[in-house]
Amino acid sequence: MNNSFVVQFWKRILLGALLFMLLMAIPVAIFVSVSENTRDEEKAVVKKDYAGDIKKGQRIFFGQADLGENAPVCSSCHNTVEIDSLNWYPSSYEIGSKFENKGLTEFKKAVLSPSTPTMKKVHATLTLTDQDVTDVKTYLDQVAVDGLTPKKPVIKNTLLLILLTIIIIIAMVDLFFTWKVKFKVIHLVVILLAIAGQVKIVSHAAIALGRSQDYSPDQPIKFSHKVHADQNKIDCLYCHTTAEYGKNAGIPSVNLCMNCHILVAEGKISGKYEIDKVKAAYINKKPIEWIRVHNLPDHVYFNHSQHVGAGKLDCTECHGEVEEMHIIKQVEDLSMGWCIDCHRTREVNFNENRYYGDYKQLHKDMKSGKIKKVTVEDIGGTDCAKCHY
Amino acid sequence: MKKYWKSPEELSYGVNTSQEDKFELDHKNAVIDLFEKDIPEKATSRRSFLKLMGFSISAATVVASCKRPVQKAIPYLIKPEEITPGNASYYASTYYDGTEYGSILVKTRDGRPIKIEGNELSRISAGKISARIQASVLSLYDDVRYKTPMISGVDSDWGKTDVEIINKLSAINKEGGKIVLLSDTVISPGTIKVIDLFKEKYPSLEWIQYDPVSYSGMLVANNKSFGKQVIPDYHFDKADLIVSFSADFLGTWIAPVPFTRDYSKNRKLDNGKKKMSKHIQFESGLSLTGSSSDKRIPVKPSEGKVILGNIYNLLAEKAGAAKVNVPKSRIDINELVKDLEMHKGNSLVVSGANDANTQLLVNKINYLLGNYGKTIDLDKPLYLKKGLDADMDKLVSDMEQGKVSAILFYNANPLYNFRKKEKFEKSLDKVSLKVSLSTSPDETSLIADYICPDNHYLESWNDAEPRKGSFSLAQPTISPIFDTRQAQDSLLKWAGAGMDYHSFLEQTWKEYIFSLQEKIANPKEFWIHSLQDGVFDVSSSNETAIPPESIEIYGPVDIKPAGEGLDLVLYETVALGDGRNANNPWLQELPDPVSKACWDNYLNISPSFAEKNGLQNEDVVEIAGLKVPVFVQPGQAEGTVSLALGYGRDNTGKVANNVGVNAWPLVTLVDGAQQLSIEGVSVKKTGKKHSLALTQTHHSMEGRPIVRETSLEAYIKDPSSGNESHEEAERNKVTLYNEVKFDGHHWGMAIDLNACTSCGACIIACQAENNIPVIGKEEVKNRRIMHWIRIDRYYSDEPDQPMVLNQPVMCQHCDNAPCENVCPVSATMHSNEGLNQIAYNRCIGTKYCINNCPYRVRRFNWYKYVDNDKFDYNQNSDLGRLVLNPDVVVRERGVVEKCTFCTQRIQEKKLDAKLENRALRDGEIQPACVQTCPSEALVFGDLNDPESKVSRMFGSERNYHLLEELHTLPSVGYLTKVRNVKAEEINDAGHDKHA
Amino acid sequence: MEKQAYIVGVYDDEEPLIEAARKFKDEGIKIQEVYTPYPIHEIFEIQNVKSRLSIAAYIYGWIGGLSILAFMQYAAVLSWPLNYGGKPENSFPSFILVTLVFTILFVTIMSLTTFIGRAQIFPGKTIDIIDPRSTDDKFIFVFPKEGTDRQKVESLLKSTGAVEVYDR
Amino acid sequence: MYKTEVRGLLVEGGKTLGDVTRDVMAPLETRSPNWWRVVFGFASLMSIWGIYSIYITITQGIGTWGVNNTIGWGWAIINFVWWIGIGHAGTAFSIFLLVLRQKWRTSINRAAEAMTVVAVLCASIFPALHMGRIWNFYFIVPYPNTRGPLWVNFNSPLFWDFLAISAYLLISASFWYLGMIPDFASIRDKTTSKVKKAVYGFFSMGWLGSSKEWIRFEALAFVLGGIAAVLVVSVHSIVSTDFAVGVEPGWHTTIFPPYFVVGAIFSGFAMVMTLMIIIRKFYRFENYVTDSHLNAIARILVFVSLIMGTAYLTEIFLSWYSGNRYEMFTFFHNRITGEFTPQFWAMFISNALIPQLLWSKKLRSNITVLFIISIIINIGMWFERFNIVVTSLTKDFLPANWAPYHPSLIEVGIYVGTLGFFTLGVLLFFRYIPMIAISEIKGVMKFNKTKAD
């Protein structure tokens, strides 16, 4: 092919594409950024009758103020930044919120004469003057309003998208104007790869829209499934009582928690702080507002008893290795394809459950060896109206 | 059938210790902010929390933007044992609103009632309920209900209200002033005891039971004949010949549901039965009952009386009894009398006239025919109607004379439905204390000094004795949504009883009703048992005594000849009855079984009258001062026009206000009984138009074999008679592709057209079960009604004397469904259980399936019907949406929907079977329509099971499929209608003449 | 783009042009390009230019048709067989129309692409217009200046009725 | 080679090649005439009503239309089929005649193709709008997805329709554009305006007119023409299956595909006639669009009208002959007599009877008569679609479902809007695109000479 033709052709196409991309960049960026879960909360400021030095308080909290050699640094246990992992110790925000509406004396008492052994041990070397306490309290009040420092974003899709756009622009500029790289093929490869990357990001964002795989929100109580299910070997169905016979697996009510926690008042590592929340809920008659992790759209009917009770599925098949999770997380994407895939391969208790006796033809086929197993699909498990009505 | 009964520990409900009380209250206050601020939170039960809880999950998931909302999951603080979130519980209860009685099961999900079903243990309603009872659950979530007690129209609280009322009542009592309690018929033994207690405290109390549609004439007549002021129980199943004079016993007369059930028992021809009852109806307007009859003779009401007299005379002549003075009837009745004589002891003559003389004649005729003790039971009378019309007039004159100092309105709304409401209102001025116990605003409560809102019946304790010896209990299924109090509690409070109605009722049952039985030795156990069952019947022998022979027609009877003028007949509609439920949008939108009109009342005129006066549908005429549109109703008797009661309400709520005209003022009083027929009216054209919302506008089958009918005579000769085209279709059946075989289940439904009376209960049951929106008059007029099941009604024969054919039509679940094939996006296809399924979320709304469905059973969501001010019905408010069934998706704008055979119910029962490790039982799965059908015309089951009832019905020679010649292979079968007439009568009237 | 030097011969009618083309061919002088306002089939023959686009289109047709049939077979029978109104999963007659239309669509798109590639035209292509009248009413021959016997060409042009001969 | 003796001169007035370019370019080079501006304004008003109606439909729902549970399709589908029919002719015209090597097509095909593209665009608005959830339109595309994957229903005529119309739009647009490339080059080389030079130069894709370009151009034109000829037949056949696959009485018939194709050609040719008369009149192209051209179209119309009449009668005959009571009711009690009598006879008279007037040579050469008849045919064809959609749906199998149908103002508005869009499109075409294929006209000029000799 004529070289000038190729160059010209690509030039036009790419310039067109560039223009198009610049036009599309704004909506796409918005789209991609909103498809990432974000949450805003309203904040209100409460007036106080004391006023300390926030800066000073912050310095104390971060251990920058000189409090003596052995004084523990608050922030080394009480995180001030949002974290993914589980920190049993209350974060600065939690402390702040807990004491937000309480007086200085109460705060001071809690800090300097703690009740739990862990705290006793750690706080033993802590010496604070009244002024220090006021400063820290003022700082924490502010934290209670502002919340934790958001964690540093890992490379977010939006940024990646912009980066790729920049790469494309640079490659194009070089291709047409600066001519630094002699081999034109390199430009093309770079541009094509970058575009492919962008398409991938956008399509993934589009698919993930309305999905929430890996969703793992902060819960009001640092409830660790690992501690309960793994270390203490509590069966799933002990708490999620209705999974076998009800539509919902059920989030245990506080009285169920109290079955154990009336005795277990203090965790080995976690101390009292989190368990106290359960107790508080029970005493104050305030149910705990858990954040729902596994959400299905309204147009899907899902029944736990069908899967756990009749289908004899293990919880982990859909929820993953919950007993390994400190913070519960949605492991599967819960997409329709995921459901259907399982329905296509999963065997039903065809011979054990007398209900299936009605499927005479399948039984005949099974007996004659025509089929080896009966999957959910064989008995209509991929029909629309099994889940959508 | 497995039901989840109320569990014993729940019985402590209502006797909360104060600590628990506080606990619950705080607890609820905490969550109430989360969901809903509109509902005042006062009630003190865990159930209200559950209600809100259930609501939060279903409502909070509307994804409005791309942002994923954080969904909170709030568990119970302390989970009640008997509630599993996401699973339904059923509680036995009782419905009685003064017009209809039903023993019911209330289905609750997460603590809120969402559906009413029939209680199969009841010997009266036997698991079947009417459209009105089905719809009653919606009125629980009515926004207009009174939310707090009110003093002179200003919100108040119970403490203050009680103190003031007690003070005033005591003062009146001291002065010896008369206190009147005006209620409708009270059938609750408990309530009667409460009123007795109230009377003890205030001896000047006069209790008047006032029935707007009264049976006063019958009560008086029976008193005169037998010394019993009661309504007897009728056994339509035992009658082989039923002659009814304007008694719409399948639609509105006394107890339509039990009557329909009994009636259809003797109309069905299943299992090769060759005998059925013969039903002859004399009436003016075409009623539901008339349309089901074998022979319907349109007559003027006055003519009906003449005919009765003639029948009596012929019978009396043979029996040698005294005759009455009666002019000769224009209608030849010799044949009928002969027939009646042949059916001595198994015939039944009933009359809907509220006139003691006519009822005396009827009594005498039945007596001469030996029907007492056989088809009529005086020993176990029905208590459903007790009001005497004379009492009301006496009350008005008492009030005018200033004799009445206080009046309490309990389920009574005379300012709407009393014939002289102006006079009543004026005389009320002289009453110093007016207290209304109304649940929601009505015409009467507006003028009351004190409004002490009653609970909705689903929030209340109660009992009932609809028939002597048959008791039932009502229990609350949700704590009061608003700050309301049960009327009985109010009365007890004012009577200073220091006891709430719950314990009072329990005590009453333990003391009195307990003693009526011997089976259970422990009163507590008896109470729990009754509460679980919902009903209690005194066991007694089925034999009934024949009343003494000494009855005589009271006084000399002279029957006037029928007048020549135009008669106006007022009637109750099946949907609205006397109008007390007018604010229920489901009922307003239920098409009348005969006219297929909704959202209006109208003057029915006969086609010949219309022609004579140049009137057309929708022309507004003036009659007795009312301006109403006319509706040309085939079968309207010559010389009569008829108009429905129950419309024209004001200040009742956005649904009922200004719908239709109020016809109650036209009622007249003759011989101390309110008459619903008025002689000598005139109709004047106004030249205006008022549009009517009709759901069917073409009434002839055009000679098509749609509803197939035959005569009993022909049927006995050849069971497949009338169904010849079925054979033809079977013969011509060729198929390009092999028919699909269904392994496992193949759901099907059989509909016995002989049993269906077109009462419409199935329509409302379906609406409640499947979250079907109400669309309002304008949209119904645009022919967009959303009901998934409809009842087609065709006329054959002459327009002035038509034969009526009814046919319920829902999705036929065709195995070769034309609709499935044309959906481009695979939103609708066939399940391996033979269901025609639709995935709403896949539908893009091309409406091709609607066009390609020869049955036109698919519905399109033309607008957004939820949360849209243009459709300001129950789905437009948070409260109204609480009635939604959480198992069924609320459809979005722009998607097609249709009958699913209640897939959710099929799945539920299948799951139950799997969990219990057993095979499904026949009849276990009941779609909502089947469950409620009072005549059991609909049967659902598995066609793969040769023993199932539906398979047997499919095997009947009468079975055919709608439009089977199209080879759509429907899973719904119809059984031909058989009329108990001679073969030539069908041929005359049958299919070809009107083509 | 760099401009090449040409000898241009202009005719104002079709017949002399064809005559001339024949003559040049007989003389063994290669005409670099002929520009005409409309297609002249005789010139194609003389110049011996050919297009194999129709063969390509035929092949595209087979590819498109077979692939859509295979796809439908996969989607409707293998991937997720569904029961639409009792029809068999592979309801072939229904597939015919889709196959037909998709084949046409496929051939169109592929032929267009091939045309653009082979004829090397695309929107906004920069070109060297030899004589703007060639799209109006003139027919022109173009010879490269280098390696052409100018005299002979010019005389031949003149003799065959060229109205104008010029260098460019 | 082919000699046009039957038709007389293809181009009259002794035009030279240069004249052709100048004449065709004239409307592009001069200021738009006043009538153009007036009509443009008027069409814009129609379009605004249309856009408003579309807005209401999308935001409030199909409920704003007059359709209901019995009649799921109303004006939207009538208009869709009508527009598709009109949009048929352009391609049918130029492609059939191209394949048949009918030289006289050259002066008409450009306008006909332009009309096709605009009409198909107008048509495609309707199926999109009549969907309840237009925002889920992409469900109709069988793309790999995470739903299982859930494909589409290949049995559904609507899917065929979607594919056929997208293919048709793409192909007619490319065919149209392809033909314009040499003409754009002509304009580029001829015009004096710099802007026009740049713009037309861009769109001419670097066309020079070398023989290598020409031979590939011709090859592609024949490939596209050949396959599009199949498409012309298949598109309307597929549109007809929307009805023929349905069970409704009056729909379920095998005559539909040919009947629809012929009907489409009929309405399309009538519209071509309308347009050509306007072009000829207002742009003084009498020398290019000669009387003999119009004569030729008129003769085709007579012929096609006969086919239409036969089709109508066949349908009626078959409904009787089949003995199917539903079919018989639809044809005899709902069309020929009954509620829809006026619509049926409007269709029959305007499509089967009135065009027969064109047998007369005198009438055929009267431009006014031709114009009026062409308009009548288009109205008649609209009624044909009305008959098919509305009469069958309003009164089908179960009389209980029979319901009346009245279009709402919104539905009418969308139709008027598409008329506006069409007019706007055609006006822009008049203004900015050579209305007559310059190079093709030039190509056939030589036959003039043979004739003149």
Image (tube, rainbow, N blue to C red):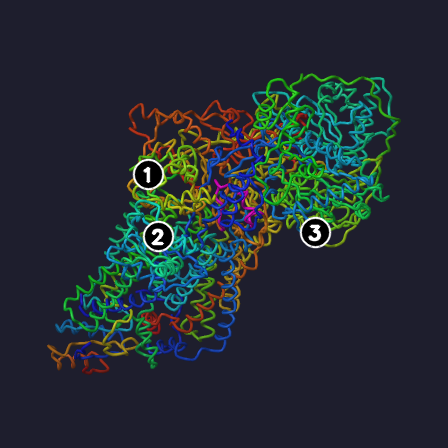
**Residue occupying the point 19% across, 68% down:** C46
Membership of A304 in magenta stretch: no
The answer to the question of whether label 2 and label 3 lie on touching residues, with beta carbons closer than 8 A, is no
Q: Nearer the viewer, mark 1 or mark 2?
A: 2
Q: Do marks 1 and 2 both belong to one polypeptide chain?
A: yes
Q: Amino acid at mark 1?
A: His
Q: Residues within 10 Å of mark 3 (few under 14, many from 20)?
A: some
- Seen from the viewer's position, the closer of residues B166 and D315 is B166
Q: Residues within 10 Å of mark 2 (few under 14, many from 20)?
A: some
Q: Amino acid at mark 3?
A: Gly
Q: Position of residue A82 (x, y in %)?
A: 32, 55
Residues in magenta?
A: B874-893
Q: Is residue C13 left or right of residue B78?
A: left
CA gap between label 1 and label 3 equals 58 Å
Q: Residues within 10 Å of mark 1 (few under 14, many from 20)?
A: some
Disc 1 marks which residue?
A: A228
Q: Nearer the viewer, mark 1 or mark 3?
A: 1
Mark sitting earlier along the chain (1/2): 2
Vertical order, D158 against B459 (above or below): below
Disc 2 marks which residue?
A: A111
- Which secondary structure, mark 3? loop
Chain ID of residue with mark 3: B
Q: Nearer the viewer, mark 2 or mark 3?
A: 2
Q: Position of residue B200 (x, y in %)?
A: 76, 33
Disc 3 marks which residue?
A: B153
State whether residue C95 appears in this view: no
- Which secondary structure, mark 2? helix
Answer with the quarter of the image where residue B719 lies. top right
- Which secondary structure, mark 1? helix
Q: Main secondary structure of the magenta part?
A: loop
